[in-house]
Amino acid sequence: MQYELSYWESESFYKDIDVAVIGSGIVGLAAAIHLKTLDPTLRVAILERGILPIGASTRNAGFSCFGSMTELIDDLEHASEEQVLAVVEKRWRGLQRLRELVGDENLDFKMLGGYEMFTEEEETIFQECRERIPEFNEKMGKITGWAEGYKVVDERIPGFGFEGVRHLILNQPEGQVHTGKMMNALLHRAQEAGVKIFNGFAIKQLEDSSQGVAIETEFGWTLRVPKVLVAVNGFARKLLNMENVQPARNQVLITQPIPNLKVEGCFHYDRGYFYFRNIDGRILLGGGRNLDLEREQTETFGPNELIRNALTQLLHTVICPNQSVEIDSWWTGILGLGPVKKPIVEKISPNVTVAVRLSGMGVAIGTLVGQEGACLTMMYDV
């Protein structure tokens, strides 16, 4: 579909924008709000291609997590300890920034802890984790202020009703948020600050020059603004040809309400590739892309039956065994990954800044990344 802008549309809606933020997810909204905080006179507009924020911000599990032990041990095999802890510190600070910006009540924030599950086949990695708990508590405690964040809580397994789970390690400072309430609150904050938000705004490409950034739309017309901040995470490769950002699709389900549901908290399994939690008397369960990495490296939404079957089996045999549990609905979200888990916040041209590649930790790190992107866009100190 192509059409030209009318004089009224051009003059009343798109004129005199100082900064255009592309993407209305956590990063984009946090960036736009921060831009208005830094300079209330700035005319800031968010350009979002979806009816709602599309990608991961409204499609995640609502985990306020920052690092399960097996994930961090795995990360340490691919990066230095300094690099791994620097990312964890950003996640932790990002969570605190989110809570400060939105408020725990608006987030429906609950610090119920983050659990990591281990089956009988994972006894070796569990024993390694158990032995390293004092080491991790010391290092993570310097970041979180929790002297004993990690601890073994095998005694809680019967209370949750799991089948085949031998061990649980709890990360006490982790919690959960209500993703929908979080995004509604961020949208409200942005609108209160005077940020304009345009949905259904499909962008073909960006071209930076001494006259500013030309935003070529898929509608056949071009908008020119002085500065642009790109916050599209997993879609950065498609929009900007960023080879160091790999899209990754995640499969997610939610059950019908389960009478007398015993599960409470956020749970990780298999280095965080599988995850589930309680919400409104239901189980929300997702992940499993490690079962079919090649096909899940896509920015296209849609089902993967291999993974969905694995998630269904995990639900019925481990999480809610011997119960009649019905699945209410499925959906998919698109993450932004890379060779390392460090987010990319940088200028790619004089007037275009990117804040992308959140590595599946958008709830934790997104607010901080957005604020850093806003500061870099205007060349302010963070």
Image (cartoon, rainbow, N blue to C red):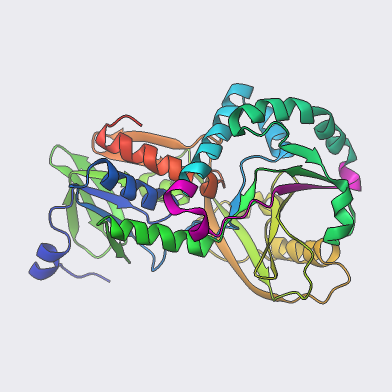
Q: Residue at position x 55%, y 32% from top? A: 89
State which quarter of the image contains the C terminus.
top left
- Which residue is nearer to you in this view: 247 or 72? 72
State which quarter of the image contains the N terminus.
bottom left
Q: Find residue 288 and report its image quarter.
A: bottom right
Residue 219 sits above or below residue 117 on the image: below
Residue 345 sits above or below residue 181 on the image: above
Q: Which residues are magenta?
A: 99-122
Q: How far from the left and from the top, in percent, is residue 205?
A: 29, 51
Q: Residue at position x 57%, y 63% from top? A: 332
Left or right: 72 in relation to 263: left
Q: Residue at position x 18%, y 52% from top? A: 17
Q: Residue at position x 62%, y 32% from top? A: 145
Residue 217 sits above or below residue 137 on the image: below
Was residue 140 drawn as part of the magenta stretch in this picture?
A: no
Left or right: 179 in relation to 275: left
